[in-house]
Amino acid sequence: MGMSSSGFSEAVSALAFGMAFVAMLGLFRAREAVAFGGWRWVLLAALAGEASLHATLIDGPWPRLSGATMVLAAILQLVIAVALFPLLAGIVQKLQRERAGVWRDRIERAAAARAQAETWLQLAQQVAHFGHWRFDMAAEAFEWSNDVYRIHGLEPDDIDLSLEAVLALFHAEDRTTVASNLNVVVVEGGSFEVAVRLRRPDSELRHVVMRGTRLQDDVVGVLVDVTNQKITEARMREANAVALQANAALKEMTLEDSLTGLANRRQFDQSLVHEFKRAVRTSLPLGLVLIDIDQFRSFNELYGQMAGDACLRRVAQAVRNVPRRTGDLIARFSGEEIAVLLPLADEQGTERVAQIILAAIQALKITHEASESGFVTISCGAAAFIGLAELNNPLELVRRADQALYRAKSEGGDRLVRYEPGLHADERGSYPLPAELKIDRML
């Protein structure tokens, strides 16, 4: 025999209240369920009674009790409804407490993160030697971070941070710069950056870079202490100056001319004394050719210093390429003058070398519009001697070659002149050797 429709409805109701009973029982077994109060047990009892009541009415033999049963069911449902209010209130309170705890945790974490960020900022400012500041345009007063106080060598109680007081901390020559830049930003907006100096209470002068930007009613910025950087730069400049001096001194001590690659005057002087001593000992000849580029000053004026240096290098290379014997020395004598020292060369040999050099320079065909020939030319003075019968000092050989060179240039240049006794020594100046190389008489 099948279940009637009313029996099916009672079965569903019994099952629903039973499931609600089981669900609530599971909820109340949690440790936090004490927050719901004693009403939880009333609710469980009402749910259990309601489930049992509907179960007994599933096609039961109690039709005469149906009225009383309905009253009982209504009472139980009322109890369930009443018990739900404190239950729901407890649940709401629990959720609020949990939510408050979540927000409290978030706030605490945010505060901890902010504190950590401020700590890192302070550390960064200390390491980088900078601090931040704010200028209140309405109050015309500053606010400083701790590191700005540190840069100024002040404590917060040492100054009121008014505009006038802060400007007075800067070097007298820099106050106008700070004030004018700050005023422009206040009036027109934008940003500024200035490198200025400030004077600390202990009279120490500090170099700083001040940067500022207008933000609504305030100007905010940073103050960077660059004193150590300035000190380092100054030391580097001093070190570079010392290095340049050392290089210059070393260059003077070297024996090569940096522009032409020839031997320099120092090496020429040493070689001249050495070869003169050997010529005295062996009674062998010693020749010298002095070379000067004609109208070289006008060449530089016409084509420029760099072109003049290039011309001198080409002439020097051409002289160097002239075939010569081992022991010959080619040196930059002075300015545009080149000396060719020729051991074992007599007058004829010296003159022959000079003629080859003269022809080699003519073959270069270096354009020189101020020259009569239209090209760069040279003048050569040649001199030679054999033994002490002719001279007793190496400087005399230089004077003779120089006098011959003077005659070649006075006759128009682009020629060779050999020294002759008729050339007087007073026609040209002297060429003294360094003190350690002077020789009065070689025996």
Image: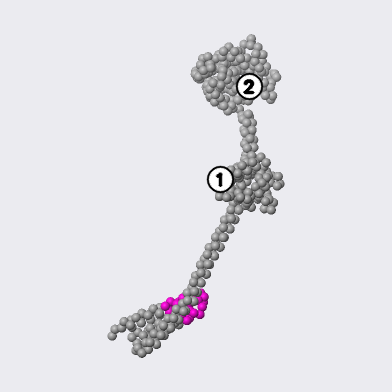
Label 2: state its secondary structure.
helix
Is any atom of residue 361 visible in this view?
Answer: no
- Pick whichever, 178 or 104, lies toward us: 178
The answer to which quarter of the image holds residue 275 is top right
Q: Height in image: 172 above or below 62?
A: above
- On residue 189, the disc is 1
Q: Residue at x 48, y 73 (%)?
A: 91
| Residue type at tag 2 | Leu
Q: Is residue 66 above or below residue 100?
A: below
Tell me the crowding category of disc 1: few under 14, some 14 to 19, or many 20 or more residues within 10 angstroms, Cα based: some
Q: Main secondary structure of the magenta part?
A: helix
- Quadrant for the C terminus, please: top right
The amino acid beneath tag 1 is: Gly
Which residue does the numbered mark 2 point to in the structure image?
272
- 38 or 237, nearer to the observer: 38
From what the image shows, is residue 239 above or below residue 72?
above
Residues rendered magenta in the picture: 20-43
Mark closest to the chain's N terminus, 1 or 2: 1
Q: Is residue 37 shown in magenta? A: yes
Residue with the most extreme top position: 422
